[in-house]
Amino acid sequence: MIELEIQALAVSREGLLIDIGRCVVASGYTLQRQRLTQDDHGVLMTMVVRGPSRKQRTLEDALEAHERIVSFDVSPFVEGAPKPHFAASPPAPVIRQPIAQAPKTAIAAAPVVAPAPVVAPAPAVDKPAVDKPVVDKPKAPELAAAPAINAVPERQPEPEPEFEFFIAPRPAPAPAPAPVVLEPFVEVIPLGPDVAAVEKVVPKLTNSYPEVFPRLLTLENEVVDAARESSLMLAGQRTGTWVFERDYANSAKLDLRDAIERIGIPALRALVDVENKGEQVHIHNSPLCTKDGHSGCTFFAGYLEGLLSPAVVSNELSIFAVCCRSWGAGECILALSG
C-alpha cells in the first residue's frame, strides 16, 4: 500500500470533492485527507489517498479523463513540510510610479516699439539781396507766415498681453492590486486515539444513548488536536459494536447495500437525520461537524464500521468521508465499499 498526494486544478468548487472522491474510490484508493483553496486560476484541490501501488496508473488515467479537472499532479506523499500547489499563482509585485509634474511654459512678451521722433520743419533761409532797378509796382498784400504745424506722432501699438500656459499633470496611475496571500496548507500529523479518554467516555455514551453528542463534544475538548479524529473513530467503533450486539446480533449475513438499508440507516436515524443513496450515506446537520474546520465524520464512520462489519458477508469494509460541512459542503457524505 502506498500514499499518494494528488494536486488538481478545477474551474468550479461546487460538488468537486464528491466527484473526485468517487473517482478515487472507483480506482481502488481510500481518501485520507483533502483541502480546497480558491485561486486566481480556479480551485486548487489537494488530496492524500491510500491504496495499492499497482493501481496508480489506473488512478492517473481516471483523473486524466475526468471532465472537471483542468490539470493535475500525482506524487508520493511525504510527511513534514506542506508541499506548495503546482498551480498556485505567484504573488504579484507592487509597482509604484512617481507622479510626473509638467513644467510651466510661458510666451515671451513682444518688444515694445519706441515712438518715432517728431521732426520739425527746417526754418526758411533768406537769400542775399540783388540790386535791381526800382520799378514802381503796386504792393501785394503781405501774407502772414503760417505757423509751423507739428507732425502728429504715430500711434504706438499696444503691448501684447503675457500668457502663461500650464500643462495639466497626468493622473496618477491606479495602484497595483495587493497580492493575494494563499493560506498555507497546514498538515497536522495525526496521532493514535487517546484510549484512556475513550474508555472513560464509552460507558457514558451507552448509558445516555442516543443522546451521545454532549459526551462526544467533551471528548473532543479533552484530547489533543492530533488525536481528536482517531479518538472519535474509536468511540464510534465501540458504540456501533454495542448497538449491533444489543439489537442485531441474531441477524443473518447480508450484502453491503442490504446491511446499510436494514441496519445502518435505522441505527443512524436514532442519532441524526440521514438519507440513504445506494452505497452513500448523507448526514444532514451533523452536530459534530461545524464550520470552524473541525470534522466529526470519523465518529459516524467508526459507528458504521462497528455496526456493519459483523453483519456483512464481505470482510473488507471501507468507509471514508467524501465531503463534510466543516469543509464548506451543505451536508456530510460517507461512501461505503466492500
Image (cartoon, rainbow, N blue to C red):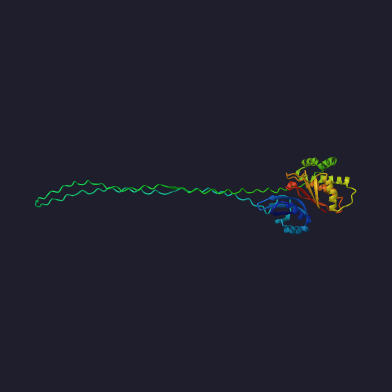
The residue lying toward the viewer, choosing from 38 and 152, is: 152
List x then y, in percent, for residue 176: 59, 49
List x then y, in percent, for residue 129: 13, 50
The residue lying toward the viewer, choosing from 139 and 117, is: 139
List x then y, in percent, for residue 231: 80, 45
The residue lying toward the viewer, choosing from 174 and 200, is: 174
> In the figure, residue 69 lies in which quadrant?
bottom right
Work out which quarter of the rendered image holds the C terminus and state it. bottom right
Residue 302 seen anywhere in this rendered image of the structure: yes
Q: How many marks?
A: 0
Residue 2 seen anywhere in this rendered image of the structure: no
Q: Is residue 208 above or below residue 92?
A: above
Q: Using residue 328 as the reference point, say whether residue 315 is left or right of it.
A: right
Work out which quarter of the rendered image holds the N terminus and state it. bottom right
List x then y, in percent, for residue 208: 84, 40
Outermost residue, right side: 250
Residue placed at 74% from the left, 46% from the top? 326
Residue placed at 84% from the left, 50% from the top? 261
Q: Using residue 218 as the reference point, say whether residue 143 is left or right of it.
A: left
